[in-house]
Amino acid sequence: MTYAFGSRTFLLLMRINPAVAFTLILLTLMFGAGIVSSSWGYALGRQALTGVRQPETRPSNATMANRSGEKHHELVLLDENKIIKDVEARVDSGK
């Protein structure tokens, strides 16, 4: 039998290099660990979301309801001096 690489090269290719074997073993273990951790994470996430449901309405529907003529609440600004007086009265009454 003659090979294109020669008999000496073929014998070297047939021998298993320990570094290559170690690399393949580590890659296989890392791939297996990735599969195990991803399935475990999926199971934990699925269990965590068992009682959670989606909202009944979409956010876009709520926006459309506000445009349909519902009255908006106006912003009421409070007088700062009145708030300070109320706080001082509460602090003084606690003494």
Image (cartoon, rainbow, N blue to C red):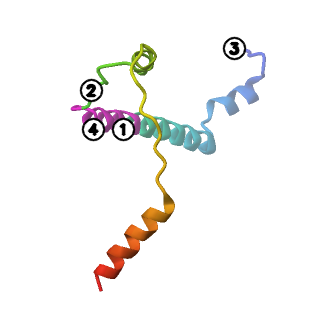
Q: Where is residue 44 in the image (x, y as percent from the top left)?
A: 30, 38
Task: Please indicate whether residue 69 sits to the left or right of residue 93 in the image.
Answer: right
Three-letter amino acid code of the residue under disc 4: Ala
From the viewer's perspective, is the residue at label 3 or at label 4 nearer?
A: 4
Name which residue lies at 75% across and 28% down: 9
The residue singled out by tag 1 in the image is 41
**How many C-alpha atoms fall within 10 Å of the one at disc 1: few (<14), some, or many (≥20)?**
few
The residue singled out by tag 4 in the image is 48
For the N terminus, which image quadrant?
A: top right
- Give residue 1's mark: 3
Residue 5 in magenta?
Answer: no
Mark-to-mark CA distance, 2 and 3: 70 Å
User: In this view of the protein, which residue sits in the foreground, 71 or 37?
Assistant: 71
Mark-to-mark CA distance, 1 and 4: 10 Å
**How many C-alpha atoms fall within 10 Å of the one at disc 4: few (<14), some, or many (≥20)?**
few
**How many C-alpha atoms fall within 10 Å of the one at disc 2: few (<14), some, or many (≥20)?**
few
Three-letter amino acid code of the residue under disc 1: Gly
From the viewer's perspective, is the residue at label 1 or at label 2 nearer?
A: 2
Q: Earlier in the sequence, mark 2 or mark 3?
A: 3
